[in-house]
Amino acid sequence: MISVKDGQNQILARITRPTPPEIVSLGAARGRVLAEDLRAPFDVPPTDNSAVDGYAVASADVPAAGSRDLDVVADLPAGSVFAGALAPGQAVRIMTGAPLPCGAETVYPQEAVERLDGRIRVGPIPKGANTRMRGEDIQANTVVMERGTALRPQEIGLIASLGQCQVLVHRRPRVVLLSTGDEVVEPGSPRRPGQIYDANRFTLAAAIVESGGEAIDLGIVADRRDELRARLLEASALGELVVTSGGVSVGVYDFVKEVLDEIGAIDFWQVAMQPGRPLAFGRIGPAHFFGLPGNPVASMLAYMLFVRPALGKLAGRRQLFPETWEARATEPMSKKKGRREFKRGVLRWRNGGWEVRTTGPQGSGILSSMVAGNCLIVLEEERGDVTAGETVLVEPF
């Protein structure tokens, strides 16, 4: 068996280039990954402007004490420009976002002035108050987003503020899914005694989409060597990654590893982790192959640890692994040395620090533990049993 880290490194070393770039509309860019650095074509904001609804005045007209009356010479809505320049003793009524008139450097909020007939009475205020300066958000020609950035709503909004309606991103990696085994059946169909409904394919398909990939579902393959061989060859022609669940252990009907030896290559099989030890990684033609365990928690965990980083690298992402935090264990946890264990946990902030407990029974078939939890508790290879009060690593979902 190899370690989790060695397995991850081997997988990522096999992926040498991301998917090709394509141009998409900004409305379709959520979750996509930038294929080039994005530079600002102009300053944001493009002009000095008002941060509030109020009155723009020259700083020289702001009294140091007492009050002063100023003539209101114009109304300036957002999107309009004041022609000319303010003369001493003048003010312009201005709306949020409107460019500051020439000669104005300070804005009084409308509730901070006394409105008279055609005039306002103002008091002391910090000079330059309630204004937004040109380029204070972004300066022209600076890199505002680096290649490899995954686009969230805030990045998409920022791109729109630069006037772009399209963006160059990497194509979504195509991930082909197969479930194996006579014991699994499609949800919604009759289930014979001894059979279970196929949860893994649906879990994995949702995880692939959430990770920025395109899931191609080829359904369930029975425990027949020739059929499995044909479906894996078909899958390898459809996507960059082929992911199966089940059939990679040492049972009599676990054919995935044997078939892969015939039509492709295996780089490693079995990882020193719990749950999810039976994991196969290799190649079928141009496609990278992942044979995940059949137990639903082990399958989902193996996806998170091995498939998701590979998909991220194919998609061009710069950050491939989530951050881990430290938390105090509130209960003892059993742990064998020599393997990395992942327990499903509930993380919360209490008494000025993070604390974590398990979700309860940790069997690799208890998918409800992933639903009840909000993190993984990561126990390193060299670690033994954990006592209550010790610090452990957690990886929030």
Image (cartoon, rainbow, N blue to C red):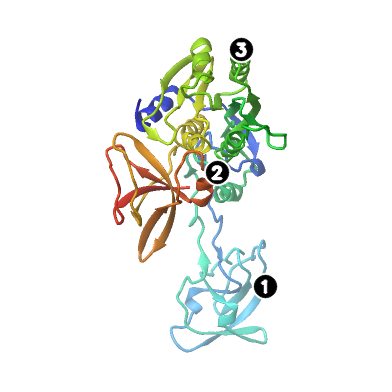
Q: Is residue 108 above or below residue 168?
A: below
Mark in front: 1 vs 3: 3
Q: Is residue 22 above or below residue 237?
A: below
Q: Which residue is mark 3?
A: 226
Give x and y (percent) for residue 84: 62, 66
Q: Which residue is mark 1?
A: 75
Give x and y (percent) for residue 208: 57, 36
Residue 289 seen in the figure: yes
Mark 2 residue crowding within 10 angstroms, few (<14) / some (14–19) / many (20+): some
380 sits to left or right of 117: left
Amino acid type at image mark 2: Leu
338 sits to left or right of 37: left
Which residue is outermost to the right?
Answer: 189
84 sits to left or right of 8: right
Whole-Å distance between the Cαs marked 3 and 2?
Answer: 42 Å
Whole-Å distance between the Cαs marked 1 and 2?
Answer: 39 Å
Q: Is residue 257 above or below residue 351?
A: above
Give x and y (percent) for residue 17: 48, 25
